[in-house]
Amino acid sequence: MADKTSRNRGLGRGLSALMADVISESEGERPRRPDIRVPVESLQPNPNQPRRTFDADDLAELAASIREKGIIQPLIVRPETNGQGRYEIVAGERRWRAAQMAQLHDVPVIVRDYTDTEVLEVAIIENIQRADLNAMDEAAAFRQLMERFGHTQDQLAVALGKSRSHVANQMRLLALPDDVQQYVISGALSGGHARALIGHPRSSELARQIISGKLSVREAERLAREPGTAPAARKPRKSGTSGKDADTLLIEQELSSTLGMGVSIDHVPGEEGGKLTLRYMSLTQLDDLLRVLSGG
């Protein structure tokens, strides 16, 4: 029988179907009933878990809640290939770690026969839905879902209960220089601060000014527009035949949101042809663009 991962998945098993397994009771859904209870020592983490770090304070807080109320939402697991009553955690590693801190002997689980590809997909979805991800982690998760599984921004927005503009705006953050992205990851900058710097040639310098001055998002936006700091692309064009029409500007914005980089369309009036310019901020971003264009 052909391996399920070799099929043309499209939405595969269905992104919404996978979402049904990880949706939490906090979003208005009743907790799923567990299939069985499994000893904590019979579970092992997914080695490809997208989240690599777990905040100690958050785990301690979760452990305290588990001591008082137990684990409300079961973990999602799949049987290990070698059997012997052991399982691999697909979603819920934080709850498993906290359960051990709370000295629980077993935990409720839902057993699923997921493929390797679906395991990764569910793990990413759970991180987006449940964890307090910073804007960069969320943007990276969106990109991974799109590049690895072929989901579009519209499909992600519908399935995850987020607006398409939110998905697009988060992904645009991936165009920022690495140091600015690290400021967002560390919490020194919010996603709103960072969005004001997208495409700015001095984004790293302005980011440090925003942090040192403890500027609000609105103040950061004003700083990025100040004469001498605003990028040339943000200067208003003179009115006349050289001005871009609303349709062209909209297409530029849509492409920029989709690709996560600066886009400029220069259409020659009265002719069929024109010029499309893409601006990348790093070699990593260029590699990402080449992968998208090559279908890799």
Image (tube, rainbow, N blue to C red):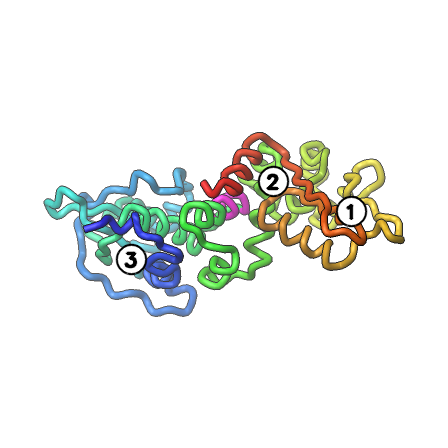
Residue where numbered disc 3 is placed? 71
Counting residues from the start of the chain, the first of labels 1 and 2 encountered is 2
Residue 159 higher or lower than 275, as above or below: below
Calculate the distance from the C-alpha at mark 2 to the C-alpha at mark 3: 39 Å
Please give left or right for residue 230 compared with residue 278 in the image. Answer: right
Q: CA distance from mark 3 to mark 1?
A: 47 Å
Task: Give SS at disc 3.
Answer: loop
Q: Residues within 10 Å of mark 2 (few under 14, many from 20)?
A: many
Q: Give neighbour class at mark 1: few <14, some 14-19, many 20+ (Cα, 10 Å).
A: few
Q: Main secondary structure of the magenta part?
A: helix
- Secondary structure of the residue carrying numbered label 1: helix
Q: Which mark is residue 222?
A: 1
Whole-percent x, y for residue 270 in the image: 80, 54
Question: Residue at (52%, 47%) from the top-left corner?
Answer: 139
Region of the chain picked out in magenta, as a range: 135-141
Which residue position holds label 2? 175
